[in-house]
Structures are given as C-alpha cells and as structure tokens.
Image (spheres, helix red, strand yellow):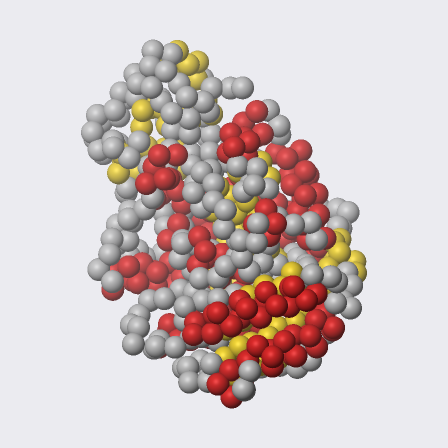
C-alpha cells in the first residue's frame, strides 16, 4: 500500500496513508521529502516551506493559512494552521456548465407502491407520539404488538419517542410539528399510529390538519386522556393496522424513484479521499438515472459553499443557497457563538485541521451534479435531482431532517465510527479499512479499499449493488441492532 496521497497537483501538502516515522524519505513528484516528525495516518505533510499567513492548499483549494513558520516535511495540523474564514459574505452567481452524465441500463429495486403513488423501501408500523409525555405508552404498545405478532409479514414495529410537542414556542413548536408530520407521511411506513396526550401544545386536531391529504385507513390517532384504557384501545387500532400492512408486497420500481440522503460524521483525513468521493460518484449516478439525492449539514458547507452556488441551475436557486448559508451564519451570530468553531476534537485527531478542509471534503458527497432546489428545515422533497437541505451538522438532527424530507435511506460516511440510526435505514460507509475491520457491527460498507488499489469505478459498482440490496430489504447494521432514533432541531425557549 502506498504511504501517502497527493490529492491535487496544486496541493502543497500530501496526506499520510499510514503512520509515518520521523526521518523517513518520501519521493513526492520530483522532490524527496524528509519527515521532520512522526506523522499519523490521515494527517498532512508539508511539501515546501511556509511562512506565517501563507496559504495551505488541499483538494486544489486553500484550507487555511500557516500560523507560523512550517518547514518541508513538517506535520501540518490544527496547531500550526488556522482558518481563513470570517463573518458573513456577499456572493455572486458564476454558473458552471452542467456535466454530461449518462448511465445505462436503467436499474430497478423492489419497493412498496403506496396508495398515493409514493414508494417505500420498508414496510413498517410506526408508533409516533405527539408529545414526550406519552413516550412510555408508545414503547409499551410496540412491545405488546411485537410480542403478539412476532413481526410476521412486516419489516419492523418501531416506536419513536422524543422530548418535544409541548412547552415550545415559535419555530421550535413548528419544527416539531413538521418533522412529525413528515414521519407520518413517509412511505417507508405501511401504517402509523399517532399517540397524543390531550393537553399538549401539539394538539391532535391541529396536527391532523397539518397532514393535509393522508391515507385514513393507514394513519390512525389516539388521545390517551380521552380513553379509559390507552393500551387496550391502542392495541385494537394496531391490530387493524397490522392486518392491512402485512398484506403489502414488494414490486419492481425504477431506480429513478429512489431518494437518498448524504451525510458524514466522525470524519477523518481520509473522508474527502475515499468515502465522500464515493458518495459523490454515486450521487451523480443516481441523479443521471432520474433519482434524487440531498446534501445537508450547512455549517459544514462553510468554506466550500461557492462550489455549490456555482452549480445552481438558476439565479433563483442560487439566491436560495445564499440564504441557506448566510441564515445559518446569522443563527450563530445571534446566539453569540463563533461561526467557525469546527472541526471537532475527533476530526482534528483524524487529520482535519480547519473548517475549510472539513467542508471541502464534506461537499464531495454531492458529486458534480447541478443543484436543482434548496429545502428549508422540515420541507418535503418536490424536485428530483440534487437538493440542498437546511439542517445543522449534528449527526442525528441532520439525519432525521434528511429522512423527514422524504429520503428512503441515509448514506453516512465516517472515519471514526458511530452506531446510531435514524427512522430510515442509515448505512455506514467507512473511510478506512481499519475501522471496517474493527467495527463490523457498525460499518456496512468499506470505501477504504480505494487506498489499497481498488479503482473508483469498481468500488462504485460494488456499492450500487449493495445499496440496491438494502433498498430490496437487506438490513443495515443500525436496523439489525435496533438503533432507531429521531432528534428535532431546537433553537429557542422551553416554557
């Protein structure tokens, strides 16, 4: 295996593929680089001398500036490099030509066609509380139904407890209502029981109106303060829902109807070299098939946002993207927090030193496709192709938002590992083989083979085959382990 990667010819740093020792000689281009320090895998090596304020270039773009003198062969990390980013910015639209992408033959998967024409890749029964006060009830109902039916004929019975639905004001209250609405309407659920208390802010009557049109046979409600025995009443409804959902069957669906969320977390120095570029190639492939992908975690676009802005299909979409970025920056400023307090300690330990470096790696998940639309938090998808979604970088909050937008599954790249899953299948893709080997109960697919000689075309074919298997019903590790959670974005006062 090679010892380093020089990603772009314009880069003035290289990345160590394995742990390197002080004094080692590396032949990089026409230079011999003598390492001045031990350099951990995933971290950067200086390819020439830098003086303070000189730009550090990676991926062909500046990722920050030197804090101090750095000499050839030094370890470049957060201690000797700082961000170039500051404050709000003004942007101009410089559209780039759309890349030509044609992929054939058209592929299919086995999914569930719902009454309204939408498609799901799972046929599950969901029990969703309107308010955290009834979390125990929804969990008990799920246990009772599972014990009674053993899940025969359906994919899962899942309760989704959360802490909200009351004592919230303004945007927080609406965020809760929108995310829960999006869950109730999600086609991965064959049936849904919504459980309310009766005195909460998120009243069932108003929530039912928020749903708009829905399948009244498959979506049912119970207000626990109005019934004598909430478990008996709930089980009567669930038995009826189970009888309906257990009759559903998979049918052949074109891949053009698949909607996929793109997310990364626990990133390392290989994220922008292996797993994120893999998702970018796959995203372009799916978009070319007529499908849909969604990129979020807005604070991790800072520093690479102009790349996305220049790929917007119109001035209108460009302006939406500008608001997406600057509104999130204003959110930091209004809360008196630094805009660029990123990367995390784990990111730094993995080789990421500045937000620009993290963002340039993060946005590679979106490939090269044109940006077709921008969604606000809690919005549902209406436009095929590549979309941007407003949500923070927090893994569970952002993944919940992706699922709520209508994504059938979330593709989650990671260099350090994480076990969680949201309310749709959450597939973990490792950036390196060591993580894949160490955490087989967390990681579903390994992109680290790119460091070991496999080419991107071969890797993407294997990945696409595996993803279609998941769409057909194969369980991700988070599903096997029953790691199924939601988290709702909160910004304001709790009463």
Quarter of the image containing the N terminus?
Answer: top right
Frontmost residue, 240 versus 455: 240
Up-down relation of residue 448 to residue 383 (above or below):
above
Position in image of residue 472 (x %, y %): 72, 53
Quarter of the image where one finds residue 208: bottom right
Residue 389, percent from left and from top: 48, 60
Asked if residue 89 lies left or right of residue 184, the reply is left
Q: Which quadrant would residue 219 be assigned to in this image?
A: bottom right
Examine the rendered structure and indicate whether residue 480 appears above or below residue 397: above
Q: The C terminus lies in which quarter of the figure?
A: bottom left
Q: Is residue 487 left or right of residue 407?
A: left
At 59% from the left and 75% from the top, the residue drawn is 193
For the point 25% across and 64% down, which residue is it?
A: 334
Residue closest to the eye, 82 or 43: 43
Q: How many marks?
A: 0
- Going 58% across and 29% down the picture, which residue do you hit? 449
Residue 65 point in image, percent of width and height:
27, 35
Point 29% across, 62% down: residue: 330
Q: Is residue 85 visible?
A: yes
* Residue 380 visible somewhere in the drawing: no
Indicate the position of residue 382 as horizontal and vertical percent values: 58, 68
Q: Is residue 226 above or below residue 36?
A: below
């Amino acid at each position: 295996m090679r010892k380093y990667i020089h990603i772009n010819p314009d880069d003035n740093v290289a990345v160590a593929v394995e742990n390197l020792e002080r004094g080692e000689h590396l032949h990089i281009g026409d230079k011999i680089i003598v390492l001045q320090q031990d350099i951990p895998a995933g971290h950067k090596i200086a390819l020439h001398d830098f003086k303070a304020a000189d730009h550090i270039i990676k991926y062909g773009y500046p990722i920050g500036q030197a804090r101090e003198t750095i000499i050839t062969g030094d370890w470049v990390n957060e201690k000797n490099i700082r961000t170039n980013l500051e404050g709000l910015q003004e942007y101009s639209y410089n559209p780039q030509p759309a890349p030509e992408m044609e992929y054939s033959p058209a592929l299919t998967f086995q999914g569930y066609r719902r009454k309204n024409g939408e498609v799901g890749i799972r046929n599950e029964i969901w029990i969703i509380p309107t308010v955290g006060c009834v979390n125990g009830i929804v969990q008990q109902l799920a246990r009772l139904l599972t014990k009674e039916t053993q899940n025969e004929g359906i994919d899962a019975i899942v309760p989704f407890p959360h802490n909200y639905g009351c004592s919230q004001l303004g945007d927080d209250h609406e965020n809760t209502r929108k995310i829960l609405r999006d869950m109730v309407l999600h086609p991965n659920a064959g049936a849904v029981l919504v459980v309310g208390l009766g005195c909460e802010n998120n009243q069932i009557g108003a929530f039912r109106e928020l749903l708009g049109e829905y399948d009244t046979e498959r979506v049912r409600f119970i207000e626990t303060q109005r019934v004598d025995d909430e478990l008996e009443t709930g089980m009567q409804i669930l038995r009826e829902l189970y009888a309906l959902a257990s009759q559903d069957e998979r049918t052949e669906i074109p891949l053009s109807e698949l909607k996929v969320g793109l997310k990364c977390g626990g990133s390392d120095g290989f994220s922008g070299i292996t797993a994120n570029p893999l998702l970018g190639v796959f995203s372009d492939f799916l978009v070319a098939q007529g499908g849909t992908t969604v990129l979020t975690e807005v604070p991790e676009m800072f520093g690479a946002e102009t790349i996305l802005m220049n790929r917007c299909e119109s001035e209108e979409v460009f302006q939406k993207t500008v608001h997406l970025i600057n509104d999130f920056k204003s959110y930091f400023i209004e809360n008196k927090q630094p805009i660029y307090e990123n990367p995390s300690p784990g990111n730094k330990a993995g080789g990421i030193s500045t937000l620009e470096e993290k963002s340039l790696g993060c946005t590679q998940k979106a490939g090269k496709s044109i940006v077709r639309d921008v969604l606000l938090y809690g919005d549902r998808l209406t436009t095929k192709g590549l979309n941007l979604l407003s949500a923070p970088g927090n893994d569970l909050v952002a993944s919940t938002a992706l699922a709520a937008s209508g994504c059938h599954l979330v593709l989650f790249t990671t260099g350090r590992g994480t076990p969680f899953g949201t309310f749709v299948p959450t597939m973990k893709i490792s950036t390196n083989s060591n993580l894949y080997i160490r955490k087989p109960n967390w990681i579903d697919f390994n992109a680290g083979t790119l460091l070991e000689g496999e080419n991107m075309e071969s890797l993407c074919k294997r990945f696409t085959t595996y993803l279609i298997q998941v769409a057909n019903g194969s369980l991700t590790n988070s599903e096997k382990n029953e790691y199924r959670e939601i988290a709702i974005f909160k910004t304001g006062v709790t009463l």
